[in-house]
Amino acid sequence: MQKIFLQILDWSEVWALCIPLSVLLIKKKQPAPLRPVIIYLLIALPLNLFIDIIWKFKTPYNFPGWLQTNNYLYNVHSIVRFVLFSLFFIKLRQPFLATVKKITPLIFLIFVLINFIFLENFFRFDRLSSRLLSVESALLLLYSLQYYFYKFQDESDASRSSDFWIVTGLCIYSAASFPIYLFYETLLRQSEDFTVNIWKVPDICYIIFCIFIAKGFYESKS
């Protein structure tokens, strides 16, 4: 039973995305600020599917060399997620730190270029880019916190809107993932088994993230 549960959890990056996507089949018309989130889901689904297929089947089916790692796909996913959720926050048109929110994606992309040109190999085989994932999580968490700051200061907009649920899910996922990504390489050097097991935390939080996105889609008033 435990083995079945772990297998289900291992594939959560794929099936969890089907939760909000299934809600979209019912409520197809969504507000304009949510469109970047919809695009993210449509890109993340095939990306995560390939990530898990490579992870689960690369050895028994003797995949070619370039398919013996899925780390570069995690890099692509991280970049796509940050850019699209940055666009989501910008489209909300909250005046608080508006200029900062607009230039942050550009700064992030410059960081990505510097990191993968001078510091790390984008197609690194042995481990994930702890630097990329932790920076992405930290910035998304800061986006979420500034959203709450503005939301709770604005007495005319205190409702639990669709964007509130999506940001809440993103905040939970980013807050839980950030310390794991930040200390990933240190943990890996100390204990590989512990690092593999603690990776279940982001998996569970990703499910929660997708459930909150689904809640946001369901509660939307387009």
Image: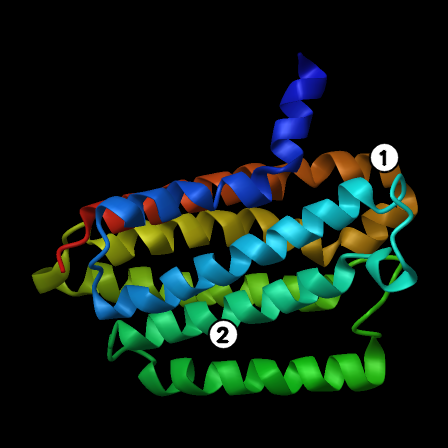
For the point 34% across and 80% down, the residue is: 97
Q: Is residue 141 visible?
A: no
Badge 2 amino acid? Val
* Position in image of residue 46 (x %, y %): 57, 56
Badge 1 amino acid? Asp
For the point 75% across and 54% down, the residue is: 183
- Quarter of the image where one finds residue 28: bottom left
For the point 78% across and 59% down, the residue is: 128
Above/below status of 145 relative to 53: below
Along the line of sight, the residue nearer the viewer: 74 or 97: 74
* Position in image of residue 167 (x %, y %): 36, 56
Q: Residues within 10 Å of mark 1 (few under 14, many from 20)?
A: few
Above/below status of 143 relative to 60: below
**Alpha carbon of mark 2 to alpha carbon of mark 1: how far?**
32 Å
Label 2, secondary structure: give it: helix
Label 1, secondary structure: give it: helix
Chain-order first, disc 2 or disc 1: 2
* Position in image of residue 155 (x %, y %): 11, 61
Label of residue 83 in the image: 2
**Residue position for label 1:** 193
For the point 56% across and 46% down, the residue is: 176
Along the line of sight, the residue nearer the viewer: 19 or 99: 19
Quadrant holding the N terminus? top right
Of the residues tagged 2 and 1, which is closer to the observer? 2
Q: Residue furthest front?
A: 61
* Position in image of residue 131 (x %, y %): 72, 67
Count of number-bearing discs: 2
Above/below status of 64 relative to 192: below
